[in-house]
Image: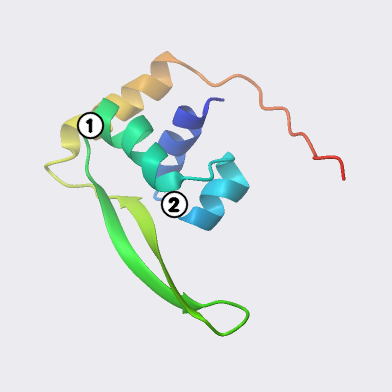
Amino acid sequence: MTRKQALTQHLLSGGKLSILNGYRHFGISNISREVRRLIEQPFNVNLTRKKMEGKTKYGSYCTWLEYSLANSRINAGGIKEMRKSLKENPAKKVVKMKAKS
């Protein structure tokens, strides 16, 4: 499964993307760039960006963005294209690998 397919499937199923799960689940260290490049531009959709706030384990204030796909009239055509793309290009079997320490 390509990163584009994985992101598309995750967003269509109602999932949200952030820096943390982008890296952990998809191997993407710069989710803001890849969301634009792999999802928004090719499918002509606008992802919803929600500013999240929290603290680091050291107590410092931090912010990040959480991306989600709104099922709106504006995104209707793009969502249809996303589903069509997944249907036409079925994902191959995923082999999980562990990093060696």
Earlier in the chain: of badge 2 and badge 1, it is 2
Q: Is residue 13 visible?
A: no
Vertical relation: 39 (above or below) 81: below
Residue at horizontal 59 percent and vertical 45 percent from the top:
25
Percent position of residue 51, x then y = 33, 67
Task: Report the Cα–Cα distance between label 2 and label 1.
Answer: 18 Å
Vertical relation: 38 (above or below) 91: below
- Please name the residue that numbered disc 1 is placed on: 78
Percent position of residue 47, x then y = 27, 47
Where disc 1 sits, the SS reads helix
Percent position of residue 96, x then y = 74, 34
Quadrant of the drawing holding the N terminus: top right
| Amino acid at dot 2 | Leu
Q: Nearer the viewer, residue 56 or 25?
A: 56
Residue at horizontal 26 percent and vertical 54 percent from the top:
48
Residue at horizontal 23 percent and vertical 47 percent from the top:
71
- Please name the residue that numbered disc 2 is placed on: 17
Vertical relation: 51 (above or below) 33: below
Residue at the right extreme, as displayed: 101
Front: mark 2 or 1: 2
Q: Residues within 10 Å of mark 1 (few under 14, many from 20)?
A: some
Quadrant of the drawing holding the C terminus: top right
Residue at horizontal 34 percent and vertical 32 percent from the top:
37
Where disc 2 sits, the SS reads loop
Q: Nearer the viewer, residue 51 or 33?
A: 33
Direction from residue 97 to residue 28 in the image, left or right: left
Mark 2 touches mark 1? (CB < 8 Å): no
Residue at the bottom extreme, as displayed: 59
| Amino acid at dot 1 | Gly
